[in-house]
Amino acid sequence: MSIEAGLLRKVPGVDRVLAASTTLIDTFGRDAVTHAVRTTLDDLRHAIRSGSTAEVPSIDALGTRVAALLSAADQRSLRAVYNLTGTILHTNLGRAVLPRAISERIDDILYSPANVEFDIAEGGRGERDDHLESLICELTGAEGATVVNNNAAALLLVLNTLAHDREVPVSRGELVEIGGSFRIPEVMARAGCQIAEIGTTNRTHAKDYRGAISDRTALLLKVHPSNYEIAGFTKSVSDVEVADIAREHNLPFVNDLGSGSLVDLKRWGLPHETTVAEAIEAGANLVTFSGDKLLGGPQAGFIVGDRALVAAVRANPMKRALRVDKITIAILAEVLRLYRNPDQLAQTLPTLRHLTRATSEIEALANTLAERIGARLPGVTVRAASCTSQIGSGSLPVDLLPSHALELIPEREGEAHLQRVRQHLLQLPRPIIGRIQSGTLVLDLRTVDDPEGLLANILADPSP
Ligand SMILES: *Cc1c(COP(=O)(O)O)cnc(C)c1O
């Protein structure tokens, strides 16, 4: 008998390994453990046949292999990461991060039934929107409000409700694509309305709106161009003018603001971005905006404005498919309440805290971290350097904020070395996502809330 055949005969049966794996079975379930034991034993037989193993491990050692397989398979796909890309609202990294104080306040809602559609005062059926509507109206000056899954859903629902089988004139300069496959013309088509393109890419005039209106026109729409800006020989029609034209023709004016700031960012020395209240004041009958962009909340889409139009939107059967759950309602209520005290917002709301953080503070952090990391990352030089952050998610697209970063420079030049550093950061207990810029890996520190945690993480061993 060959050595190989002798070894193969010593490989224990599945039952023997399973019998020694009761703790694993309690944790992972019998089926998963059985599957992992089979895989482990198959791998072992394969290794024996190929000559890469000359012994059969003990049952205990095989159990360790089974446990490793099970733990690897049990790794969560969705994990917390460090967003050090310099883009504060990064769509691929989940956009706005929520204030920590929220979790204890929504705990009860998570673990018990809640009056989502139940009116406690009346003891009968209530409206899902009741929990947010008055707060939103208070903060925006609107008469009515409803909330759906995201702003794409908000626009889809508004257009489908008010413009199905009819025409909507839109400036060619506003037929934009806003990342993540959201394209205004496609959403309009799916909402069942026809686009009447007006003006040109760079210039649209009031007479273009007037000329496009017919008895097929359902409403006038303006879309915030969000992630790009047309500069130079340009002309667009102001919100007030479009509102006037809409009123002259008895048509609703819908303004898709995109980011939907609830406070004037000029207060913190940032560039002005039209607030929802300003858009309402300028005469929009409905305004749509996102919950997780500048507003700094969870993914959600707001539809605010005239009471009758909001009621029509709410009555659309599609609303049922786009509505938000109790968890989103609970988180939104907490985030919106922070806006009642705008003086504290730069402390209480992470998005605004990150946006308004003093450059000197970020610089001090970069210097401290660079010094403390020193030469402790093998093969990499770490130094503090200036950089620029951006807001992201189509908010204030061309404005860059001066910031500071850790620059990780591989000691040996070349793309492969840079990629190795990048991989190293991705394999840390909490993956670190930076950006590559002229041969270095740049970690913008603007969004770091826990420097000690970041430091411990950078110096930790990567997972295999
Ligand atoms: C971001 C954006 C949207 C889409 O919003 P989501 O919340 O991502 O669905 C729609 N319109 C404009 C103008 C935007 O900027």
Image (tube, helix red, strand yellow):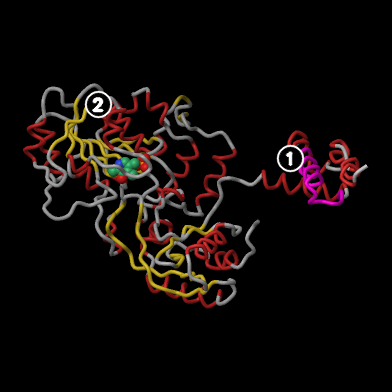
Disc 1: CA contacts within 10 A as few (<14), some (14-19) or many (>=20): some
Please tell me which residue is depicted at 43% across the width and 57% down the height of the picture.
350
Which percent across, then down, holds residue 451?
52, 67
User: Is residue 39 magenta-colored?
Assistant: yes
User: Is residue 46 magenta-colored?
Assistant: yes
From the image, tell me which residue sits under label 2.
Answer: 193
Give the secondary structure at mark 2: loop
Above or below residue 189? Residue 55 is: below
The magenta region covers 38-57
What kind of secondary structure does the magenta stretch mostly adopt?
A: helix
From the image, tell me which residue sits under label 1.
Answer: 28
Which percent across, then down, holds residue 299?
42, 43
Horizontally, is 342 left or right of 328 in the view?
left
Please tell me which residue is depicted at 80% across the width and 49% down the height of the picture.
51
Looking at numbered disc 1 in the image, what kind of residue is underneath it?
Answer: Phe
The C terminus - image quarter: bottom right
Above or below residue 420? Residue 366 is: below
Q: Nearer the viewer, residue 396 or 197?
A: 197
How far apart are the alpha carbons under marks 1 and 2? 51 Å
Query: Does residue 138 appear in the picture of this structure?
Result: no
Q: Residue furthest front?
A: 2
Looking at numbered disc 2 in the image, what kind of residue is underneath it?
Answer: Cys
Ligand 1, image quadrant it occupies: top left
Q: Nearer the viewer, residue 142 or 66?
A: 66
Which percent across, then down, holds residue 145?
32, 36
Question: Are the residues tagged 1 and 2 within 8 Å (C-beta)?
Answer: no
Numbered label tally: 2
